[in-house]
Image (cartoon, rainbow, N blue to C red):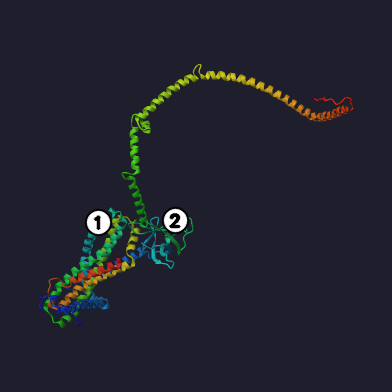
């Protein structure tokens, strides 16, 4: 199959292209299921296995947590000020706090955490995997290699990335909640009860569940999609056609779908 | 999985940072604690740990009422809407969980209102007028009064339109008000003339001048009249003399009248005697009549017995 001709120009190849596309998605989902099952099995959390997971957690979370929290707090501070000042100018300051919590904590911070982790993890994986992909192993050998990597790298990495998204989102959310409080009420404890009620109103059970599920799904997508794309590349090395990082577009697509679905369920 | 003796997973890499596992464990514990704390905080904020009592509010319309919204008393949130359902009687039942520590503010005479404003959320409020009334029992049912600012808008707009049309009619160039104002302007213009209000009222300075002249003449006339009437040898002096004479005449007349009175008394007595006399006169007449008849008979006897022929002469009786 010459790579220079796009499949769209060959109607007889449409079916094959569709099948390949679906197989690729299925491969990713299958891999994800295996990874989740492995992550939930006790053997992964034994001391010897935990070491690899710990290494990944250290790389993906420990090293970046403070910087990410600081950077997103600064950005959040700007957004909080903008929202408060705008709301005040319209005489709607009573709704500013709720809006800040909804926009920042529920939507922007999880998404930015997921994108940040995806960028970082994807780059890290890409560098180590491309060499293998270019070696052009036979399909059978590639499959074995995939399984080995799955045990050694993928599951710890998946856990680490999921934890990274959860940690970054959680820590930054809490920092932002504190920042929002200080911005609205100043350094006084007397607004605490009012603030708590506002937070309670925003975090209805369904919203809280949606927030947690969305964050976990973000973590899974970020951990899984680039890895699956690279492993697939090992099986079909000739598909290394583009200079775009494998799986990046798919990851972006999935993140947008998750976010859109969450918004739809929450507000429609 | 190969059973290799040197497991790559446990083998530390050369460039591995120190205490990786401890750091990862700390991080995991920290995140776990954070998540747990956050969930507990949200549960606390949702009022999961507060003891509450249920209050059911009955409304006609549930629009704007969402589970989780606050019910306030004097601006302080004292309860949360737990559930909104449409009852069998087509009324909306709003179940409110009132915190037990704040339930004391609700009394049997409390009033509940549901207010929607044009901007912002619907508000559920409680008002208690008499705080000495018995407290509201748990699981009570109360009717909620609905005050909807937006529902009033069509009526307000209709009224405002009618008002504006009236205003337009009133302010049109040929309107009554404009004509009145023009007249008023003419009148006030005249009023600002030489004769002021008088000129305005009479329709011009010329008329006002005539009136002034007439007034002057009347004044002069009054002066003269005053002199003639109340002056020396005026009408009043003559009148006084006449009155004095009249007084004397009246006294004489009074005496005369007294005399007349006496005469009348006399006349009355005479009248009484006369009446008695006329009563006797009847009997007298009877006797006279009888005497006459006797005389008559006597004459006729004489005429028959008298030897003389009948003379033509007759005895004439008076």
The kind of secondary structure element at disc 1 is helix
Determine whether A144 is above or below B15 in the image: below
- In the image, which disc is placed on residue A203? none
Measuring from the top left, give residue B64's x and y in whole percent.
36, 61
The disc placed on residue B128 is 2
Tell me: B133 left or right of A108.
right
Quadrant location of the C terminus of chain A? bottom left
The quadrant the N terminus of chain A occupies is bottom left
Between A185 and B129, the residue placed more toward the observer is B129
Residue B20 appearing in the image? no
In the image: residue B317, left or right of residue B191: right
Q: Residue at x 32, y 62 (%)?
A: A199
Cα separation, mark 2 vs mark 1, equals: 40 Å
Numbered mark located on residue A82 in the image:
1
| Above-or-below relation of B158 to B9 | above
Q: Is residue B113 above or below residue B4?
A: above
Residue B203 visible within the image: yes
- How many residues crowd mark 2 within 10 Å: few (<14), some (14–19), many (20+)? some
| Name of the residue lying farthest toward the front | B309
Residue B262 picture location, percent across and down: 71, 23
């Amino acid at each position: 199959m010459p790579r220079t001709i796009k499949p769209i120009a060959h109607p007889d190849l449409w079916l094959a292209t569709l099948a390949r596309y679906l197989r690729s998605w299925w491969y990713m989902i299958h891999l994800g299921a295996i990874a989740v099952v492995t992550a939930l099995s006790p053997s992964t959390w034994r001391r010897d296995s935990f070491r690899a997971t710990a290494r990944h957690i250290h790389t993906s979370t420990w090293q970046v947590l403070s910087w990410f929290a600081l950077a997103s707090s600064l950005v959040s501070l700007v957004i909080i000020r903008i929202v408060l000042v705008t709301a005040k100018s319209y005489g709607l300051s009573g709704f500013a706090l709720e809006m800040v919590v909804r926009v920042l904590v529920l939507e922007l911070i999880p998404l930015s955490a997921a994108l940040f982790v995806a960028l970082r993890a994807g780059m890290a994986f890409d560098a180590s995997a491309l060499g293998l992909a270019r070696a052009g192993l036979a399909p059978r050998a590639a499959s074995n290699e995939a399984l080995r990597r799955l045990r050694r790298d993928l599951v710890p990495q998946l856990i680490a990335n999921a934890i990274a998204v959860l940690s970054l989102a959680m820590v930054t959310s809490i920092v932002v909640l504190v920042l929002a409080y200080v911005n609205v009420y100043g350094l006084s404890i007397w607004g605490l009860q009012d603030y708590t009620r506002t937070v309670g109103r925003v975090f209805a059970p369904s919203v809280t569940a949606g927030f947690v599920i969305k964050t976990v799904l973000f973590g899974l997508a970020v951990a899984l999609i680039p890895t699956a794309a690279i492993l697939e590349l090992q099986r079909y090395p000739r598909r290394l056609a583009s200079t775009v990082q494998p799986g990046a577009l798919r990851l972006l697509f999935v993140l947008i779908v998750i976010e859109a679905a969450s918004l739809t369920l929450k507000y429609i | 999985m190969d059973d290799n003796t040197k497991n790559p997973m446990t083998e530390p890499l050369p460039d591995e940072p120190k205490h990786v596992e401890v750091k990862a464990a700390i991080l995991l514990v920290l995140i776990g604690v954070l998540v747990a704390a956050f969930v507990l905080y949200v549960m606390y904020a949702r009022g999961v740990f507060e003891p509450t009592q249920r209050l059911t509010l009955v409304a006609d319309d549930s629009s704007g009422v969402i589970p989780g919204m606050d019910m306030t008393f004097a601006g302080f949130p004292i309860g949360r809407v737990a559930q909104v359902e449409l009852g069998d009687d087509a009324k909306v039942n709003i179940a409110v969980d009132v915190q037990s520590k704040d339930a004391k503010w609700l009394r049997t005479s409390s009033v509940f209102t549901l207010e929607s404003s044009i901007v912002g959320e619907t508000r559920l409020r409680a008002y208690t007028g008499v705080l000495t009334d018995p407290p509201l029992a748990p699981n009570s049912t109360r009717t909620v009064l609905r005050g909807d600012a937006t529902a009033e808008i069509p009526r307000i707009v209709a009224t405002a339109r009618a008002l504006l049309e009236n205003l337009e009619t009133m302010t049109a160039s040929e309107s009554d008000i404009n004509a009145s104002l023009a007249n008023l302007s003419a009148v006030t213009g005249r009023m600002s003339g030489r004769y002021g209000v008088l000129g305005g009222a009479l329709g011009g300075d010329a008329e006002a001048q005539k009136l002034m002249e007439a007034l002057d003449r009347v004044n002069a006339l009054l002066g003269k009249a005053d002199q003639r009437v109340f002056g020396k040898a005026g009408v009043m002096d003559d009148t006084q003399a006449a009155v004095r004479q009249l007084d004397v005449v009246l006294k004489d007349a009074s005496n005369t009248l007294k005399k007349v009175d006496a005469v009348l008394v006399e006349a009355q007595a005479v009248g009484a005697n006369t009446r008695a006399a006329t009563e006797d006169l009847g009997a007298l007449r009877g006797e006279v009549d009888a005497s006459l008849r006797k005389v008559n008979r006597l004459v006729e006897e004489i005429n028959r017995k008298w030897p003389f022929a009948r003379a033509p002469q007759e005895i004439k009786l008076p």
